[in-house]
Image (cartoon, grey):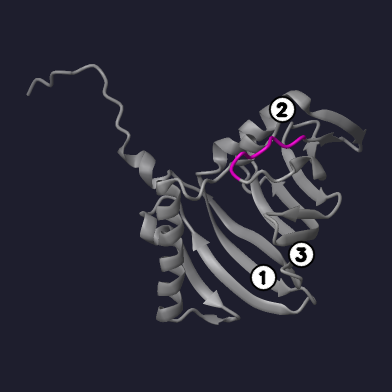
Amino acid sequence: MRSAIEFYAQGERHWAYREIKREYDRKGRLKEESVSQVDPSLPWDQRDVLLSTDGAPASDQTKRRYQKQREKERRARERGAQRERRLRDLIDFDAVELNSTSAGISTLALPILPDPNTNFPVEKIAMTAEVEIASGDLMSIKAVLLESVRHKAVANIKGMNLEIRFGAVTDQDRPPAITSLRGTARASVLFFPVGGSIEIERTDYRWVTPYDDRFNVEVGTPTAIDF
């Protein structure tokens, strides 16, 4: 399991893609649909660009608001106020167990490591992964909340489901990439019901050199050139 996650992680920063995101309210009604283009080979302010919202080209005002939110998140990460945990940081690899094997696919139980920043009871989440036996590639990760959880005194999380699909997106021998994500959540905050669902699909993949890597110059042995 560790090797499947690490192979996927090798490509995380290299994929450029188009992303379609749909958000639904708790009654299943579409709230918003957006299309964006992500390209890690570009500078930060050009790396994630909003193309359209609700089927129409994004206005300049909407693009500015989108970039302002991204900049806010970036600054929060730099201050340490918002910390991203990557997939490999979530899993207790020493406790991974094989659930079943069928049709060339292994299904494994993935215990989640506690997050001291949130103190969320991760033992109430069941997370599993599917790995293709022949290639060793990650195919999917699923997570479900086993029972209601009261979090930070004001929120009662009643349900949560998440499914992430991975796949080979080029003919070359590259790591798999996330191709889709679907998640739903139900909760109440101060007795008011909240929740909804989200669907993300990614297409048009290209393998690129991350912008920040372009400036890592390897210094070799000095060579004299005789004119």
- Mark sitting earlier along the chain (3/1): 1
Look at 43% across and 43% down and name the residue there: 209
- Mark 2 vs mark 3: give the one in front: 3
Helix, strand or loop at label 2? It is helix
Tell me the kind of residue under disc 1. Arg
Look at 53% across and 66% down and name the residue there: 36
Disc 1 crowd, CA 10 A, few/some/many (<14, 14-19, 20+): some
- Give above or below for 30 relative to 154: below
Residue topped by disc 2: 93
Q: Quadrant of the C terminus?
A: top left
User: Can the viewer see residue 112?
Assistant: yes
Residue topped by disc 3: 187
4 displayed left or right of 84: right
Quick check: is 115 in the magenta stretch? yes
Magenta residues span 111-117
45 displayed left or right of 220: right
166 displayed left or right of 100: left
- Mark 1 vs mark 2: give the one in front: 2
Is label 2 in contact with label 3 (beta carbons under 8 Å)? no
Disc 2 crowd, CA 10 A, few/some/many (<14, 14-19, 20+): some
Q: Quadrant of the N terminus?
A: top right
- Numbered mark located on residue 22 in the image: 1
- Mark sitting earlier along the chain (1/2): 1
